[in-house]
């Protein structure tokens, strides 16, 4: 049966992904599986370098997302703790005096009576009222989601770094293979040239 060449191995590498769909980098064990001649080297190196650029782009986006989650999770946790505190207060409880943040440098005093309703910022300048029980459930869910997202991002970031290293090794192997082939070709040309010179020096019989 005729062989279909190197395509199946490449497709297998391309199809494998991590749980979030980030593809595995091809592991170049034998350079000949990816290049058949020196004419293929430059296109293969460009393809590998493009993959590294894509991985680096994803890495940058993940780093930004992780930074956002690091800022977001303490706010959610603090809000959840506040909701839980308000939930413990009954109608007989005295109002509490507190301060709340209007912006980064401005605070105001407030007197908070027992309540069964809170207002939560949902983002994009949207605030909605929630019963305290629903607010607690919502915030608990949001915090759990943020923690899981953070863990996934950290895992994906480590995965991307491994793939970038794999691609850098692949590029080095292809480059080194090209250097070896170039030396072989040069040696062959020198041998042929020497053989031709020896042939010219033979006397005619």
Image (cartoon, rainbow, N blue to C red):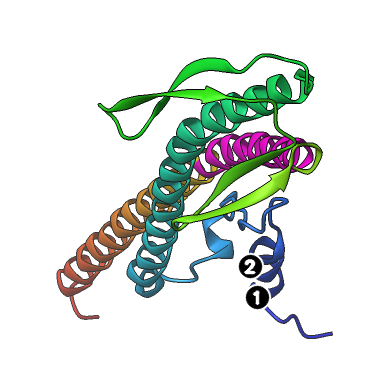
Instruction: Give the side of residue 183 with respect to residue 59, left or right.
Output: left
Q: Give residue 40's position: percent from left, percent from top.
A: 40, 72
Identify the secondary structure beneath mark 2.
helix
Residue 49 as seen in the image, left or right of residue 155: left
Q: Quadrant of the N terminus?
A: bottom right
User: For the magenta stretch, what is the residue range?
Assistant: 135-160
**Residue 67 shown in magenta:** no
In terms of depth relative to the viewer, which is nearer, 41 or 91? Answer: 91
Density class for disc 1 (Cα within 10 Å; few <14, some 14-19, many ≥20) is few
Query: How busy is the neighbourhood of tag 2: few (under 14 within 10 Å), some, or many (20 plus)?
Result: few
Q: Nearer the viewer, residue 151 or 88?
A: 88
Residue 203 sits above or below residue 153 on the image: below
- Quadrant occupied by the C terminus: bottom left
- The secondary structure that most of the magenta stretch takes on is helix
* Disc 2 from disc 1: Cα separation: 5 Å
Give the residue at x 59% y 30%: 79
Element type at mark 1: helix
Return the x and y of residue 60 as percentages of the image width and height. 39, 47
Residue sticking out furthest to the bottom: 2
Tag 2–tag 1 contact (CB < 8 Å): yes
Identify the residue shown where x is 78% and y is 85%.
2
- Please tell me in which quadrant of the rendered image residue 147 appears: top right
27 or 191, nearer to the observer = 27
- Residue 151: say if magenta: yes
Q: Residue at x 70, y 47 (%)?
A: 130
Rendering coords of residue 96 (x, y %)? 57, 15
Residue under circle 2?
Answer: 10
Q: Is residue 86 left or right of residue 185?
A: right
The numbered mark at residue 7 is: 1
Give how far across and how far down residue 72 sits, in percent: 51, 36
Q: Quick one: which residue is furthest to the right in this view? A: 1
């Amino acid at each position: 049966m005729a062989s279909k060449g190197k395509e199946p191995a490449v497709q297998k590498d391309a199809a494998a992904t991590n749980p979030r769909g980030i593809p595995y980098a091809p592991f170049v064990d034998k350079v000949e599986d990816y290049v058949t001649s020196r004419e293929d080297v430059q296109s293969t190196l460009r393809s590998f370098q493009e993959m590294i650029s894509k991985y680096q782009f994803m890495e940058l986006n993940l780093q930004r997302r992780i930074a956002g989650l690091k800022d977001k999770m303490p706010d959610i946790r603090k809000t959840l703790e506040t909701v839980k505190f308000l939930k413990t207060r009954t109608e007989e409880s005295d109002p509490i005096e507190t301060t709340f943040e209007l912006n980064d440098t401005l605070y105001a005093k407030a007197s908070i009576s027992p309540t069964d309703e809170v207002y939560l910022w949902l983002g994009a300048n949207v605030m909605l009222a929630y019963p305290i029980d629903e607010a607690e459930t919502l915030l608990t869910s949001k915090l759990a989601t943020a923690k899981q997202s953070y863990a996934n991002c950290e895992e994906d970031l480590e995965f991307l770094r491994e793939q970038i290293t794999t691609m850098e090794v692949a590029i080095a192997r292809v480059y080194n293979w090209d250097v070896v082939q170039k030396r072989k070709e040069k040696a062959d040309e020198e041998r042929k040239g020497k053989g031709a010179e020896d042939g010219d020096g033979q006397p005619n019989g």
